[in-house]
Amino acid sequence: MINRRRFLQFTSLLSVPALGCSPPTGNYSTDVAIIGSGPAGLSLASRLTQAGIKVIVIESGPLDGYSEHAQQRNKVLDAGLGLPYPLGAATKRMTGGTSSVWGGHCPRFRADDLLCKSRFGYAEDWPITYKELENYYCQAERFLSVFNGVNPCNPIRLTDNSFNLAQYLQAQGFKETVAASVTVNADGEYQPLRLKQSHLPNLLNNKNFTLLNDLTARNFEIDKTGKVKSVLCTDNEGIDKRINCKALVICAGAIQSSRFLMLVNNQHSGFDFGSDGGHLGANFMDHNAVQVTVNANGQPSGIKRQISQGPQSIQYGQAHIWQWYGRYREQGVGAYMPLAVLENESTNTTSVPEKNIRFSILCEQEPSLENRFELSKTEQDEFGDPLPMLWYKLSDFDKRTYTHAAESLKNTLEMSKTLESSQDMQVYFGRHHLMGTTRMADNEKEGVVDKNLKVFGSKNIYVLGGSVFPSGGAANPTLTIVALAMRLSEHLIQSSI
Ligand SMILES: Cc1cc2nc3c(=O)[nH]c(=O)nc-3n(C[C@H](O)[C@H](O)[C@H](O)COP(=O)(O)OP(=O)(O)OC[C@H]3O[C@@H](n4cnc5c(N)ncnc54)[C@H](O)[C@@H]3O)c2cc1C
């Protein structure tokens, strides 16, 4: 518990110490300080420490288990238009970050997901191409054990003709995709990867790696050129700590990363890190989803064959996941991707009943300056720092996309005489895929970070996470986040920090 509740006005090296300010007591030094131990933070730390670079990861949550007290630090306020769902719960303040609860679905973005502006006339193009990302996607798939890391580019095919789903999906314009899509365990079975278990033990054995838990990053100290010298943090007892570093990477998730930059901008007059173009906190995106579970009426044997036979069939424990993709940008409604999840045995690892198929279509959402975070003027967290407040509403584009997704899924089910709807189709507004708020761009007028993820106006501050995506595609975001981590690690190593 915090026993010294006070607003910590850490001072920059430039500014005059504020009245009542006490210097931080604990000091650490490292090459790279990383805020956040989720997939972004831990994948970057893995690569950097392997290359001999010293890394300290600052994690606000506990080392072991879940703490409701720490989780409260994620509180998000509604600015007045309504929140899509309780956003504070969409990320976890614990070691391993939100990988402690995620589903482990890891599709790639499509090449033209990164070219929305030039190809389809909405959002912005990414300042990097799919070709530049491809090699990092392969590295990320190995890192996250996607498709067992053996042959990441093999498609998972829906080949069993006794189960005619493929032709109905095709008739609705869906195409099979050619990438692997889920994390798997050592036996090749689908299992969401928990990074704390899978990657932290190795990291802790590396002498270049230090994890500081129960420590919340709140500010930094800079020199007169805007170079960060140290990160200023407060622990659960209210004790202040200073982490001296040569570079800082903010991997705190899409809400907290932009909030951190807003907090430091408030405290360093004369510096506006990443906020020149008015994009800091803006362009917040998630994926809306259309979902339905259907009985595989009269087809149980066909389904079993699909799982266990055929050269292309892959067995994922209890669940077989097919990845298909639909693109309806011609009608101006964005892209979406259906995933079919099939349970074949009695042991249930998900909420889907056995021998049922769950279709879940993720819908792209349009980035907009109007969907933005600001700092609350009235409400603060336990440390006295202003809470983030979200202005959020769906655009006509967003509504058209999920309506169209629902229609084409309904048509697929109606065409298939073997499938019987077992429950109403549901639309989920938001799937915990937090993106935007510090978008990547060619220049400071268009975004918050450059193509190397460095914050505009800074010398050595980087942001890594879904927050840097200029558009959200229709693929779950984490594989792309880890691919960007692989790319950033190369950049930092080459910059010889
Ligand atoms: C139920 C659920 C299912 C999901 N399923 C999928 C899926 O199947 N596929 C997929 O791709 N994505 C999925 N996601 C999203 C996925 O979890 C995120 O994309 C991913 O975790 C993002 O990684 P990250 O490291 O950027 O952020 P996070 O994992 O959120 O980690 C951020 C870390 O920063 C820490 N932190 C924040 N602020 C501070 C601070 N000031 N000081 C110190 N530490 C701080 C937090 O405690 C946290 O540990 C799912 C999410 C949820 C909630």
Image: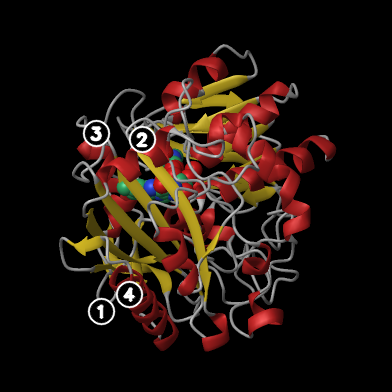
Q: Quadrant of residue 122?
A: bottom right
Q: Are marks 1 and 2 in contact (CB under 8 Å)?
A: no
CA distance for labels 2 and 3: 13 Å
Which label sits in the foreground, 4 or 3? 4
Question: Would you say 57 lies left or right of 197 here?
Answer: right
Label 4 belongs to which residue? Answer: 406
- In primary-sequence order, the first of circles 4 and 3 is 3
The tag on residue 100 is: 2
| Residue that appears at 28% across and 37% down | 344
CA distance for labels 1 and 2: 31 Å
Give, as a three-letter code, the residue at label 3: Ser
Asked if residue 244 shows in the view, the reply is no
CA distance for labels 4 and 3: 38 Å
Q: Secondary structure at mark 4?
A: helix
Q: Are marks 2 and 3 in contact (CB under 8 Å)?
A: no
Give, as a three-letter code, the residue at label 1: Gly
Q: Residue furthest front?
A: 162
In this picture the colour scheme is: secondary structure
Q: Are marks 2 and 4 in contact (CB under 8 Å)?
A: no
Pointer 1: residues within 10 angstroms few (<14), some, or many (20+)? Answer: few
Which label sits in the foreground, 1 or 4? 4
Rendered location of residue 464, percent (x, y): 59, 49
| Residue that appears at 68% across and 37% down | 139
- In primary-sequence order, the first of circles 2 and 4 is 2
Q: In the displayed structure, would residue 51 be above or below residue 443?
A: above
- In primary-sequence order, the first of circles 1 and 4 is 1
| Residue that appears at 56% across and 19% down | 203
Label 1 belongs to which residue? Answer: 80
